[in-house]
Image (cartoon, rainbow, N blue to C red):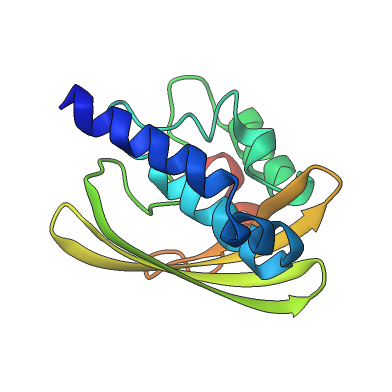
Amino acid sequence: MRRGLQVLAVAAALLGASPVAADVAADPAGEAKAFVVKLYGAYHGNGPDYLGRNAAQVFSPRLLALIRRDRALTPKGDVGALDGDPICDCQDFGISKLAVAVRPMTPDHAQATVRFVNLGTPETVRLDLVSGAAGWRIDNIHTRTTPDLAIYLQTHAGGR
């Protein structure tokens, strides 16, 4: 197992110096896709802390403000409007078969369609992405259970 990880690390290092990596850096859609692939790649072990200390590296200031408003308006001990992980639209995860397609909308806006299998169930999540000085961030999330996360948080903050 350890040897397999070493081989993977060497391959990743070589890829970082390859023309493919240079193309990604010169291509905003490629950068957006790399951002999304990295997000979903963290769903192993205990999973990512996207709603905690890493939130500003994941969500746009607009969506992050809505998430924090929900938490602030939720009475202690209660569950707010956001009662799971909006990126995987789940509470528990076992993500496999990840496929990401990115469609540029403008130079600083893109839409990512993410398909994966979570604990045996096929899922599709659409992410509205914005790019700023700090890189790509999620500005809205659209899933089967929550068609528009931003509107949902605006109208149901604090679990109301």
Place of residue 145 in the rendered image (x, y in percent of width and height, measured from the top left): 38, 65
In this picture, is 124 found above or below 24? below
Horizontal side of 19 relative to 7 (left or right) equals: right
Q: At which x and y percent is residue 35?
A: 58, 52
Residue 52 shown left or right of residue 68 in the figure: left
Seen in the picture, residue 65 relative to 49 is either above or below; the reply is below
Residue at 57% across / 39% down in the picture? 158
Evaluate whether residue 83 shows in this view: no
- Residue at x 68%, y 51% (from the top left corner): 137
Camera-side residue: 113 or 85?
113
Note whether residue 127 is visible: yes
Q: Quadrant of residue 27?
A: bottom right
**Residue 27 vertical position relative to residue 104 in the rendered view, above or below:** above
Q: How many marks?
A: 0
Residue 40 position within the rendered picture, expressed as x and y whole percent measured from the top left: 42, 48
For the view shown, which residue lies furthest in the right direction? 133
Residue visible at 65% across and 61% down?
Answer: 24
| Residue at the spot 15% in from the left edge and 27% down from the top edge | 1
Q: Above or below — where is 151 with respect to 157?
A: below
Residue 151 x, y percent position in the rendering: 63, 63
